[in-house]
Image (cartoon, helix red, strand yellow):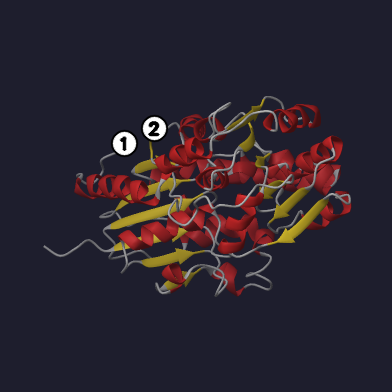
Amino acid sequence: MSAPRVALVHDWLTGMRGGEKVLEALCELHPDSDILTLVHRRGSVSPAIERHRIRTSIVQRLPGGQSHYRRYLPLFPFAIEQFNLDGCDLVISSSHCAAKGVVAPGRARHLCYCHSPMRYAWDQFDAYFGPSRVGARTSRWVYRPMLARLARWDAATAGRVDRFVANSRHVAGRIRRYYNREASVVYPPVDTVFYHPASVSPESHFLIVSALVPYKQIDLAVAACSKVGVPLRIVGDGPDRARLERQAGPNTTLLGWLSNEQIRDEYRRAAAVILPGEEDFGIVPIEAQACGRPVVAFGRGGAVETVKGGETGVLFAEPTVDSLSDALRRVGEIAFDPNRARAHAERFSRDRFLEEMRAVIADTAAAPIGTRW
């Protein structure tokens, strides 16, 4: 019996963030699969992904499509539905936006690894398209009806998925709320072999490693560090960078994107790593703990599954400057054990992800056509 033909579908390939690390691991499980994506910026993802045959959508060919693809958000549903998957036996989508809406052939099973239902179409509209971001009139008359249509499409296309796998219990709850579907939970892979402690003394500054986008709430950390009077180093890039540069004082340094080796060094030297926004999962806290460093995280979402308050970090209760400032003071008063942080991080290893996903994929592929979980 021949091996099933597998296609991997991912929203866009423009950098190596958490979702792309999941895709990279899926590529290891299916080295001969095609990858279908809305946009691919060559050289922006790992060689393990780049060596696959990558098929892109019409968005790739539009003016500025590779760098300003988000302006074409209303076209994403149409673009993702145009992919031809005839001949595939198994479709695995890695989705936080439109990928799960791909149309699989009737003979194929569709397994979706869901990083999150479309955030800006559901419960984070204001963070992306609220009046403070785009202006009151534009928010109300342009973006709100557009995102309402996307939310309806997002909910309607949940039925195209045979099985959902969520990246956290938090996201499984969102899938239940917005899609009315149940989901298995497989935590994303973290390279706990690469990220490990070193014999360097931590310094006094705090660290953020993040895409610079609104829902990450990085401006909250900038304000809190300024209030407490501690240095903050920020690794990352994105559409919010210019605004953060205007906000940043002399104690805040924006470093842009760094190599993995440089990020590992930043983790090791930080007093603690800050996760100021609500995350669906959050790989950065695990990488930091793998390097033996504590984490200061907002105590909602995936952080309550990845950070052990009082043992591997501090959780703050409210998304306010005062609440985060208090947490920054408290983290300096606790003697954290780097070995305990490291042991906790190893629960999220890459090998564990591969083992669990291999079992889920085999179970899905063996089920009769039309089986729903």
| Viewer-side residue, 351 vs 370 | 351
Residue 370, quarter of the rendered image: top left
Q: Amino acid at mark 1?
A: Trp
Element on which disc 1 rests: loop
| Relative to 319, 246 lies left or right | right
Q: CA distance from mark 2 to mark 1?
A: 7 Å
Residue 318 at x, y percent in the picture: 71, 26
Residue 319, quarter of the rendered image: top right
The residue shown at (41%, 33%) is 181
Residue 356, quarter of the rendered image: top left
Q: Count neighbours of disc 1 (C-alpha within 10 A) and say few if under 14, some if 14 to 19, many if 20 or more.
A: few
Question: Measured along the vertical axis of the image, is residue 357 above or below residue 16?
Answer: above
Q: Count neighbours of disc 2 (C-alpha within 10 A) and say few if under 14, some if 14 to 19, many if 20 or more.
A: some
Q: Amino acid at mark 2?
A: Glu
Whether residue 159 is visible, yes or no, is yes
Cβ atoms under marks 2 and 1 closer than 8 Å: yes
If the image is split into quadrants, where does the N terminus sit?
bottom left
The residue shown at (76%, 27%) is 326
Residue 130 at x, y percent in the picture: 77, 41
Q: Earlier in the sequence, mark 2 or mark 1?
A: 2
Residue 39 at x, y percent in the picture: 56, 67
| Viewer-side residue, 117 vs 296 | 296
- Residue 373's tag is 1
Whether residue 144 is visible, yes or no, is no
If the image is split into quadrants, where does the C terminus sit?
top left
- Residue 182's tag is 2
